[in-house]
Amino acid sequence: MLNEELTELQVGRDKLFDILRANHLLIKPNLITDVYSKKIVGYNVSNNLSTEGSIQALKLAIKTRVYDRSIWKNFRAKNSFN
């Protein structure tokens, strides 16, 4: 939903993005998510989606990761054939 002031100025979503882009005010997030929890574990915000931003997000994810050793437990089932 557009803010009331923008509607009064007759600035729609596309025009707003054109204004932001023309003034170099658009930002793009680089996000790294955990495959199991789907949580964002690393991020970087910049004005482009370059490889450098992705690497910075990955470094943050590696730096802040927490190991959950419970997923490495070996569950042994009883052999039902004996």
Image: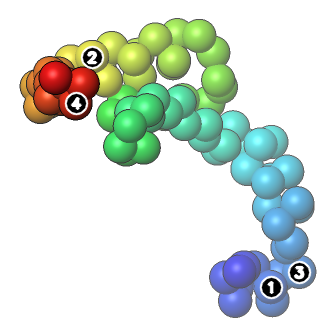
Q: Earlier in the sequence, mark 3 or mark 4?
A: 3
Q: What residue did someone put label 2 on?
A: 62
Tag 3 secondary structure: loop
Q: Are marks 3 and 1 in contact (CB under 8 Å)?
A: yes
The three-letter code of the residue at mark 1 reads Thr
Q: Nearer the viewer, mark 3 or mark 2?
A: 2
Q: Element at badge 2?
A: helix
Where is residue 61? Give x, y as percent: 31, 23
The label nearer to you, 3 versus 4, is 4
* Residue at the spot of label 4: 80
Front one among 42 and 16:
42
Q: Quadrant of the N terminus?
A: bottom right
Estimate the spatial distance between the alpha carbons at disc 4 and disc 1, rounded to whole Å.
Answer: 70 Å
* Residue position for label 3: 10
Q: Which residue is mark 1?
A: 7
* Front position in the image: 71 or 75: 75
Could you tell me how far apart the alpha carbons at marks 3 and 2 are, in whole angstroms? 45 Å
Q: Position of residue 66 (x, y in %)?
A: 15, 28
Name the residue at 77% across, 43% down.
21
Mark 2: amino acid: Ile
Cα distance in 3D space between marks 3 and 4: 73 Å
Is 18 drawn above or below residue 80 in the view shown?
Answer: below
User: Residue lying furthest front in this view?
Assistant: 82
Disc 2 or 4, which lies upstream in sequence?
2
In what element is the residue under mark 4?
Answer: loop
Q: Residue at x 69, y 37 (%)?
A: 24
